[in-house]
Image (cartoon, rainbow, N blue to C red):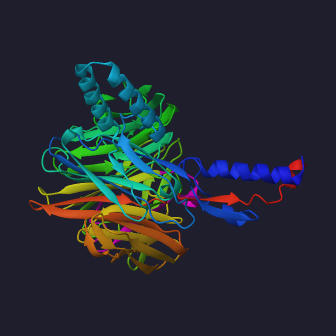
């Protein structure tokens, strides 16, 4: 095999990688530097899953979809979110053939059958109608749904919409268990998830939402770990999630043990799913608990609100090894050690919880957890309360992944939005772009410097002439690593409604070797 043939194969392989789902072919941030002739290109296809928003008849949900403008992206493409129960819409050619066949059949049938056919066709068209579809990069779009019937969503984006595609659902529940503001970013399908901070206590109603985007069933195991180790579950193994459907599973039905702090481990035996925990409390509202970053000896939990009245850390280490976690708070002035909580002891295979009180004391803050030498992997999340007793609301912040290149938060408003950024290991420069509004407005961009070891609540830009909500896109320009989160807040009846979402990298770019790269070494 000669060099020319090998180069062509390399080019074909690179193109195949680019057209794969971003969740599968996430870019290695250092790969481009390690490869001769490598180029960084936008991914060409990606997928997202949004869980069913609520079981409350009082719920009001807003879905939002957005893709930032990406240099080098294709000039064509689509980004569509549909109800998980809907099948993929037929292509335009197929629709055209169906219409012709319908017209021919209508001529052969009587009027009554023709009218019935028209009615069925109209219902089919409605069923195939997307819940949300982007029209152009750089401009977010929204859709609204009320009550308990708002569906879980399955979506794909390709071409010019694939790189950096982000979706979010934000739900306000006026009363009842879990009342308050609940927000979650739609995520990619995967095969394993960790959720420290869930509960099977009587005061909590926690569901693990499993969404299957594929045309074949997925089989899932749900493991629960409490303060003394793994909980005995009755039906946690072999849960079947039907094709293109969503399955909410009430955690308290999986075990007879009532525990305040539980770590949920989701393992997919076959297929893949999206997963998120919805944690609802009788007294302190509720929110979504997204998956923690993968088990690691170093974790960052970014953007604890400065007015938090209570912070509870829940952590878990898989396996049998114990670990003493070093705890530091990245504050505006630098890294500090919380008094009385310098180290926290975790027993292997057991969930541990620690009350950190009013940790931030009126300043922006992020938790940095470190195992000695990074030798023992850990997952973690914090439950945050705002407000005074009797009028409190809760939210969750799991350990987050860094913004390696770019990340986006949706549903922002001119008031009530806080963007929190931390650079725990080294200083960084970031660029933040406010998109056009959903109903009008001109994008604005600002650049910020984040000092090493600090967390800053930055005054994010707002679109000029804003109408509606808008997207905030954070790009790491130099230094880092950078971690970020966004808080949405409002006050209803004296209760401080809020929700916090960490901003993981959007995995919108991938390093691809040049087709002319010399791969003759493969002949050896």
Give 251 or 76, whichever is nearer the viewer. Answer: 76
Q: Is residue 221 left or right of residue 383?
A: right
Query: Could you tell me how many numbered marks the image carries?
Result: 0
Q: Is residue 83 magenta?
A: no
**Picture coordinates of residue 225, whole percent (x, y):** 40, 38
Q: Is residue 224 visible in the rendered structure shown here? A: yes
Kindly give the residue lying farthest to the left in the view shown: 493
Q: Is residue 330 visible in the rendered structure shown here? A: no
Q: Is residue 374 magenta?
A: yes
Q: Going 13% across and 57% down the picture, which residue do you hit?
A: 391
Kindly give the residue lying farthest to the front in the view shown: 107
**Picture coordinates of residue 493, whole percent (x, y):** 8, 59
Span shown in magenta:
356-378
- The answer to whether residue 439 is above or below residue 291 is below
- The answer to whether residue 331 is above or below residue 96 is below
Q: Is residue 451 left or right of residue 231?
A: right
**Picture coordinates of residue 37, whole percent (x, y):** 75, 65
- The answer to whether residue 444 is above or below residue 256 is below
Give 147 or 204, whichever is nearer the viewer. Answer: 147
Displayed quadrant of residue 118: top left
Give 478 or 226, whichever is nearer the viewer. Answer: 478
- The answer to whether residue 340 is above or below residue 281 is below
**Picture coordinates of residue 197, whole percent (x, y):** 35, 47
């Amino acid at each position: 095999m000669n060099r020319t043939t090998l180069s062509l194969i390399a080019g074909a392989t690179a193109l195949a990688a680019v057209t794969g789902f971003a969740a599968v072919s996430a870019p290695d941030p250092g790969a481009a530097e390690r490869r001769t002739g490598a180029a960084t290109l936008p991914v060409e296809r990606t997928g997202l899953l949004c869980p069913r928003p609520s079981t409350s008849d009082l719920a009001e949900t807003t879905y939002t979809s957005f893709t930032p403008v990406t240099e080098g992206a294709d000039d064509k493409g689509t980004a569509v979110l549909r109800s998980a129960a809907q099948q993929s819409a037929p292509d335009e050619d197929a629709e055209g053939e169906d219409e012709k066949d319908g017209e021919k059949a209508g001529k052969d049938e009587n009027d009554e059958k023709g009218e019935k056919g028209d009615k069925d066709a109209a219902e089919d068209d409605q069923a195939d109608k997307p819940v949300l579809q982007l029209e152009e990069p750089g401009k977010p779009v929204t859709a609204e749904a009320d009550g308990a019937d708002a569906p879980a969503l399955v979506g794909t984006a390709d071409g010019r919409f694939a790189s950096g595609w982000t979706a979010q659902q934000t739900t306000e529940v006026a009363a009842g268990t879990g009342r308050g503001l609940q927000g979650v970013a739609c995520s990619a399908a995967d095969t394993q998830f960790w959720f420290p901070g869930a509960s099977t206590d009587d005061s909590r109603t926690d569901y693990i939402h499993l969404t299957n985007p594929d045309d074949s069933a997925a089989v899932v195991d749900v493991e629960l770990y409490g303060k003394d180790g793994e909980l005995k579950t009755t039906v946690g193994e072999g849960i079947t999630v039907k094709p293109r459907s969503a399955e909410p599973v009430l955690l308290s039905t999986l075990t007879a043990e009532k525990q305040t702090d539980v770590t949920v481990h989701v393992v997919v035996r076959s297929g893949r799913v999206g997963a998120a925990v919805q944690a609802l409390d009788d007294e302190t509202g509720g929110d979504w608990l997204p998956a923690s970053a993968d088990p690691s000896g170093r974790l960052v939990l970014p953007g604890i609100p400065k007015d938090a009245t209570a912070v509870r850390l829940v952590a878990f280490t898989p396996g049998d090894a114990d670990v003493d976690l070093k705890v530091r708070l990245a504050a505006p002035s630098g890294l500090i050690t919380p008094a009385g909580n310098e180290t926290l002891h975790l027993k292997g295979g057991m969930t541990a919880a620690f009350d950190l009180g009013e940790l931030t004391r009126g300043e922006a803050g992020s938790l940095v957890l470190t195992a000695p030498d990074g030798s023992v992997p850990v997952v973690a999340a914090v439950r945050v309360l705002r407000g005074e007793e009797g009028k409190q609301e809760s939210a969750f912040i799991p350990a987050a992944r860094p913004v390696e290149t770019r990340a986006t938060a949706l549903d922002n408003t001119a008031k009530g939005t806080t963007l929190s950024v931390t650079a725990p290991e080294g200083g960084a420069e970031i660029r933040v772009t406010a998109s056009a509004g959903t109903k009008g407005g001109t994008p604005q961009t600002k650049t910020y410097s984040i000092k090493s070891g600090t967390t800053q609540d930055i005054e994010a830009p707002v679109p000029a002439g804003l109408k509606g909500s808008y997207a905030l896109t954070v790009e790491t320009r130099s230094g880092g690593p950078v971690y970020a989160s966004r808080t949405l807040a409002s006050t209803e009846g004296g209760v401080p409604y809020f929700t916090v979402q960490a901003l993981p990298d959007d995995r919108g770019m991938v390093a691809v070797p040049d087709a002319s790269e010399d791969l003759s070494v493969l002949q050896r």
